[in-house]
Amino acid sequence: MARPITPFLWLLFSAGGTVAALFFPVHLFLSGLAVPLGWLPAPSYERLHALVEHPLTRLYLFVLISLPLFHWAHRFRYTLYDGLQLKHLTALIAVLCYGAALIGSALAAYTLWSFS
Amino acid sequence: MSAPAGYTPYHPRWYRRRVSVWWWLESRSYTGFVLREVTSVFVAFFALVLLWQVHALGQGPAAYSRSLARLQTPLFLALNGVALLFVLFHSVTWFNLAPTAMVVRLRGKRVPDLVIAGANYVAWLVLSAAVAAILLRG
Amino acid sequence: MPQTVTLSVARYRPEEESEPSVQTYEVPFRKDWVVLDALNYIKDQLDGSLSFRWSCRMGVCGSCGMTVNGQPRLTCASFLSAEPPGPIRVEPLRYFPVIRDLVVDITDFLTKLKKVKPWIVRQDEKPLAEGEYLQTPDQLDAYKQFSMCINCLLCYSACPIYGLEPTFIGPAAIALAQRYNPDSRDQGSAERLEILSHHDGMWQCTFVGECTKACPKHVDPAGAIQQYKLTSATHWFKTLLPWGGR
């Protein structure tokens, strides 16, 4: 196992940032504004359910949820460290951030795996 | 770090200004940078909203309707509105900075930054259109 | 056009005071004068005790870096007429310890520079009889931009991370490592990677980007660092694969 883990965390950060940059605006706009405000019709339960059931959609959704969470974890960790100058808490911050991302990803995996 | 100074008549007393915890307010560039970093919070927020939506969808039509209703409350509309602004800011800064990290050389010459950024924006448009088409059809 | 301009210059005389102070001087306002000319006028005509560094006065030696109206600038490249009307503030380069007046201590940078081995590293020496190393224009292009660094330290002064974390190795040092890594004559990438993969190395950088904005020679240290992160990460990824070499 390569000793320094930072390159890996940075790769996760970059991948997550790219996924979020490419896909979040449209998803957020549709489900967060356009549909609730009635600008566009909500997809029917049956159709959406059938769509999510498909294994490819489940994989897409897992990537869509977990990678951006790791993007947040890495970036937020450095923001706390630099922005608030919390140097003495650096190990705790790292554990909390990446830990939260891991938990979120695990929840996503479980939800998508057992989706029916 | 420089060797710890033993101040003597022959070693001058250096002056070190302490960096304020409000350093990021000192210039527009610094503030813009911190705002860019803060977008990650809204990215995480929406990732969790997505997870919550998928969960509700899996719990049956009633749960799905309840989640739709929840998204219509003023609180969520406001949160999502603000989140959209930050997520857009993330996308734009991300694509604009991509050429700095991704240097592509074609036949020895470096591909211009505008082309790399442009390719990112095109991908963004195409993928967004695809997602919208899939979600809204039917 | 006004006849004179006021310079608000930071003073620090450790034998007299424990905190820096400000002294103002009236200096002739000449259209073609830069801040360095004004400082030299002060030293020659008004106050010989003012201390500051300068040398080539044409932007190649990197000695005259100071904070002009809040921005890290080369004083030999900052025209008096380009500044907004009003007093021009001249302070020492930010984030470095001040020795006296406008003179800062740069030992920290020099130590860090040496650590990244900014010279051609060879595993095997090419004997003289075999002739010179040949390099195509494209091979030169791969690192030329990063070789333009004049070690003026404006990038360190612009980098908030360096200000917050003085152990950070810093923009110029990493850019100079990247000047050698893609050089076709160099074989030292692995050694430099080892050094720069430390916690205080390239991973401290959060791509604020201020260093590139401040650089007077268009070195783009931020670009160098991000590119280095990418090569580092791909290298790391390759070591995971069973067929990836070390």
Image (cartoon, coloured by chain):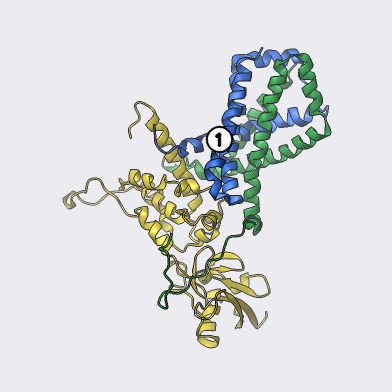
Residue B125 versus residue C107: which sits nearer the camera? C107
As drawn, is C150 to the left or to the right of C125?
A: right
Quarter assignment of residue B115: top right
Classify A5 as above or below C153.
Answer: above
Q: Residue furthest bottom?
A: C45
Give the position of the N terminus of chain B as an image quadrant. bottom left
x, y (%) of residue A69?
60, 33
**Dot 1 falls on which chain?**
A
Check disc 1 and report its element: helix, strand or loop.
Answer: helix
> Image point 80% across, 21% down: which residue?
B66
x, y (%) of residue C2?
67, 81
Q: Residue furthest left?
A: C129
> Image point 82% across, 24% down: which residue?
B69
Residue B106 in sight here: no
x, y (%) of residue B30?
62, 54
- Name the tint of chain B in the rendering: green
Q: Which chain is blue?
A: A
As drawn, is B74 to the left or to the right of C38?
A: right
Classify B96 as above or below A18.
Answer: below
As drawn, is B137 to the left or to the right of B120?
A: right
Classify B16 as above or below A61.
Answer: below
x, y (%) of residue B99?
53, 43
Residue A38 in sight here: yes
> Image point 18% across, 50% down: which residue?
C127
Under mark 1, the amino acid is Tyr
- Name the tint of chain C in the rendering: yellow
> Image point 46% across, 49% down: which residue?
C224
Q: Which residue is mark 1?
A: A98
Give the position of the C terminus of chain B as an image quadrant. top right
